[in-house]
Image: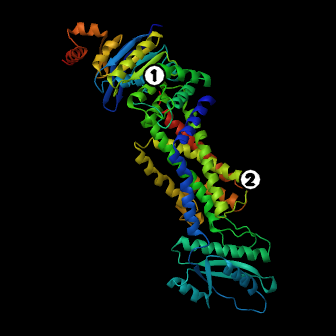
Amino acid sequence: MADIAIDAHGLGKSFGTVRALDGFTLSVRTGEVLGLIGPNGAGKSTFIRTVAGLLALDRGTVTVLGQPPGRGVANRIGYMTQSAALYDDLSVRENLSFFGRIYGLGRSTVRERTQRLSDLLRIDDEVDRPVHELSGGQRQLANLACAMVHDPRLLLLDEPTVGIDPELRHRLWDEFAALQGTGTTILVTTHVMDEADRCDRVAFVADGRVLDVGTADELRRRTGADTVEEAFLTLRGGAGS
Amino acid sequence: MNRERTWALALRIIRTFRHDRRTLGLIVIVPLVVMALIGYMVGDSGKEPLRVGVVPPALTPGGEAAPVLAFQDQLRRRPGIRVTDVTSEAMGRARVAEGSLDGLVLAEPIGVGPTASLGRITLVTPGLDVQVETPIALAAATAAAEVRGLHVTPGDLPGITVDRVSLPANRRPSTISYAAPAMITVFGFLFTFMITSVSFLRERSSGTLERLLASPIRAREILAGYMVGFVPFASIQALIVLAYATLILHAQIAGPVWLVFAVLILLVLGVVNLGIALSFEARTELQVIQFIPLVLLPQVFLCGLFWPIRTLWPPLQWISKLLPMTYAVRALREVMLAGAGLIDIAPELAALAVFALAMIVLGTAVLRRLRV
């Protein structure tokens, strides 16, 4: 099972009368970039939060890096939330240092990682500025840096490219690819369909379950569609009828 | 419990404060402005004196009138009041009722002849305004203490006492001395509660709490980090309030100063956790701010600052015994006014420790609920 990073079977989770997850089944392979694609409210974030150990399931089983989600595996997971979850009054460096220390890194390790990440994400000029002075894109880069500061084996990215200009979006996806090169598994949600081509595999999510999984090409071929968007709509219509 | 993580969190809070100069300024400036105002309002100068009536004793050959006369002499020397002689108690009561006197102070002798001492002192006021009643009561109590020092050993004389505070015989405390312990408590409570609940709400709305909960940090480490992070700021604030009260307003601190901080820190530890727990009941910062009067005002009214607790309606007395501020104010008064030591205020410290522990348990339960 070492080649499976996340293994989810028949997950069910309701919030009141809303079924956020309803028979959600998905395996994420170690070292791949898997995109969860679907409309708002499809259950993407609920699944990510379950993997991050923030939600108790009503039904189903999930293992993350061979363990149930929670504090036991938290050290090996990086979680980038939808909004830039940073301390506005602190500088990027102070944010990185805080999250690094929370994950048990020593002072010198934190300093070295801050340097490496700010080089990698090209935010060296911003690293000593308070977060509230940064642009939306810079904040998102800082947000990603905080999720990566402890060198996680699994990165959970919840809509990392929302509200970001196309150029920066490209750079982010380049970073994801580079990370993947170091053996990191990445689970990323998006509702931007053209990002599907940058994932190794794509899972279409709607109504709390996975409609289909495959490479973008496979999904297009299977549905006879020209674009990922069409493929999604075809599958969704088929599932509905 | 991982000390590294707790310390990282405490350090983060301290850094946030350092960057947020406005909040830092408010912690210091607001208490000073309010203290200056209260210092003026209840201070012994700058206002029209209060009109107080006394009934001069009949000059009996035995000498029983002497302690009463001495008391009235002392009363005349108190600042902020103007003493007028009235011919009889009935006359005085009538003038209080019609409003031409703010209060009437009656003194009785105990014993006969030259050994007579000062007995019961009764303050007759309209009972409408504590801002009038309290200064007169204080003046009477101080005058009685002066006489007590002249005539008998301290302690066997009933004086007018405010709440449980008895006046040290050889001091002339100003009114601010009575307000200072309560003000340290109220400011400490207010700022700690306000800032913890708002910062924790922000932690929730910005998503950083979610990020923390996805990390290996434990609920108790989060709470401990917050407590450690807030203690220095509450202490700095208390230090400034204390310095202002003693140096500028001439309030007294009879007991050990470290004990004042011990009481305050114990209170702050509980309040940090209360703020965190209650912040989960609010969605917006505006809603958090609305908790402040709800949490703070009953405690301020029932802690003995305005009305002595034993004069309250009995059910309110019970409530006041459940409120942490009651114990903090009582402990600080004992230390600052009566010079009490650690042993003397052990029951109050125990009550505050119980409050802090209960709030830590509550905070832990609230945080644990958020995780798998």
Q: How many marks?
A: 2
Whole-percent x and y of residue B239?
64, 52
Q: Is mark 1 on a helix, strand or loop?
A: loop
Q: Name the residue under label 1.
A: A122
Q: Is residue B141 left or right of residue A17?
A: right
Q: Is residue B203 visible?
A: yes
Relative vertical location of residue B31 with respect to residue A178 in this rendering, above or below: below
Chain of residue at mark 2: B
Whole-percent x and y of residue B229?
59, 40
Q: Can residue B159 be seen in this view?
A: no
Classed neighbour count for the residue bearing mark 1: other residues with Cα under 10 Å, few (<14), some (14–19), many (≥20):
some
Relative vertical location of residue A151 with respect to residue B160 in this rendering, above or below: above
**Which amino acid is tagged 2?**
Ile
Q: Nearer the viewer, residue B120 or B31?
A: B31
Farthest residue, direction front? A125
Kindly indicate the quadrant of the structure image that contains residue A13: top left
> Badges 2 and 1: C-beta atoms under 8 Å apart?
no
Chain of residue at mark 1: A
**Which amino acid is tagged 1?**
Arg
Alpha-carbon span between mark 2 and mark 1: 61 Å
Q: Is residue B56 left or right of residue A129?
A: right
Q: Name the residue under label 2.
A: B343
Kindly indicate the quadrant of the structure image that contains residue A40: top left
In the rendered image, the quadrant that contains the N terminus of chain B is: top right
Whole-percent x and y of residue A8?
40, 15
Tell me the residue at 60%/51% (across/down).
B237
